[in-house]
Amino acid sequence: MKLFSPIQIRSLQIRNRIFMSPMCQYSAQNGLANDWHLVHLGSRAIGGAGLIMVEATGIEPEGRISYGCLGLWSQEHAEALKPIVRFVKSQGTAIGIQLNHAGRKGACDLPWHGEKPLKKDHPEFWQVVGPSATPFDEESFTPHELSQKEIKDLVQKYMEATKRAMEAGFDLVELHMAHGYLLHEFLSPLSNQRGDEYGGSLENRMRFPLEVTKAVRKVLPEDRPLFVRISATDWVTGGWTDDESVSLVHEFKKIGVDLIDCSSGGSTSNAKIPAGPGFQVQFAEKIRRECGILTGAVGLITEFDQARNILEEEKADVLFIGRELLRDAYWPAHMAKHFGLNLDHLMPYQYLRYIQRRK
C-alpha cells in the first residue's frame, strides 16, 4: 500500500507517507520548547507517523503568532529543541521544523484567552509588520510597512534560523508561506499594496518569498530536503490564485524546493471557504500534475479509506494530517491494523503486542 511505503527525498528516507502537520501548541515560554512539546510530538512519533513537523516557529520574537509560540532566534532555542529531535528520531520517525514570520497576524493572545490581537498595554505586546500598512481586519493593529533594508534583514534571519535548525538535528526545513502570514502577505494582492519592486506585479510580489527560499536553500545542506507550505488560493476574488501558485512553484523548483505542502486561505477574515472532507486535495493534485513536484495533501482527511485513496489515485505523494492526529496519536498504527498490515516496524516493541492482540 502506497500510504505505508517509504519515500526518499534527497538523502532522507521517510518510513511512510503519513506526515504530522505543524500545529501550534501556544505552550512555549519566551519561544523555548519544553516538556509539553516533547510529549506532544514524541507521542505522535510512537504512534507511527513517518514525519513529525514542528509547529510554526518564529525566526525572531516579533515573528511569532502569539507569545506562546516557539522561536528559533537564539542558540538557547536550538538547545531546547535538541531533546525532542533526539527522541523523535529514536522512534524511527523523521522530524522537520516549520520556520515562520507571522507578519501582520502576529502579537495575538492565546486561543484559550480569546486569540484576539493583544492590547498595547499587554506586557507581551509588539508592533506587527507587513508588506503594507494594511491591517488584517478591523480588530487588528495597522502593521509597520517593512523597508527594503528590513526585508533584507529578515532574509538573513531566515538563514540564521535554518542553520540553528540543522545544529539542533532536524532532518528538513519547511518555509511557511500560507495562512496569511508574512511571506503569504507579500504574495497576495489583498495584503501587498507596495509600489516598489516588492509589490504590484506577480514577479514583484514573489520576490521576497523567493529571496528567502534561495537564502535558505543556500545554507541548507545539499542532502537535506526543503519543503514549502503555501496557501494555493485566498478563496477571494482579486486575491492569490491557484494559477499564481503554479507559477510560484515553477520558480521553487528552479531553486531546489523538494515538496509543496498545499493548504489554502488565511489572507482575509471574510473568505468563503468550502470546507469539507479533503477540500484542499485538488490543489495538491493540480500542482503535482502541472509542476512535476512532490506534493502533500491537507485538510479534513480523517477516514482510512479516504487517506488511502488520495495516494492510490495519485492526487498527492504524502498526507499532512493535523486534527485527526490530535484526536488519536496512534492513527497511523490503527490505520495499518485496519488494513491488515504488519506493525513490526511501525510501533515500539513496548506497545506492539498489546496493539496486535486487540480485537
Image (cartoon, grey):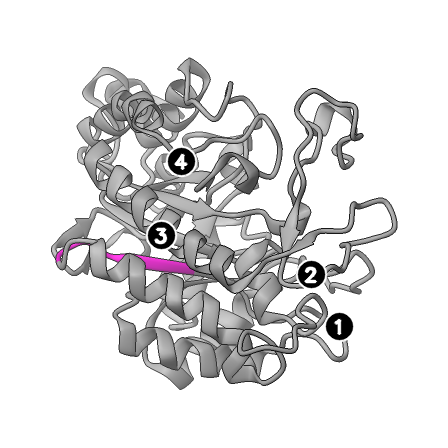
- Residue where numbered disc 2 is placed: 267
The residue at the point 30 percent across, 57 percent down is 216
User: How far is mark 1 from mark 2, CA to CA?
Assistant: 9 Å
Q: Is residue 54 left or right of residue 46?
A: right
Amino acid of disc 3:
Gln
Amino acid of disc 4:
His
- Assess whether residue 198 is covered by the magenta stretch: no
- Residue where numbered disc 3 is placed: 156
The answer to whether one can see residue 309 in this image is yes
- Residue where numbered disc 1 is placed: 236
User: How far is mark 4 from mark 2, CA to CA?
Assistant: 36 Å
- Mark 1 residue crowding within 10 angstroms, few (<14) / some (14–19) / many (20+): some
Query: Which stretch did the figure color magenta?
Result: 223-228
Sequence-wise, the earlier of marks 3 and 1 is: 3
Amino acid of disc 1:
Val
Amino acid of disc 2:
Ser
Q: Splitting the image into 4 quarters, where does residue 94 fall?
A: top left
- Residue where numbered disc 4 is placed: 334
Q: Splitting the image into 4 quarters, where does residue 225 fall?
A: bottom left
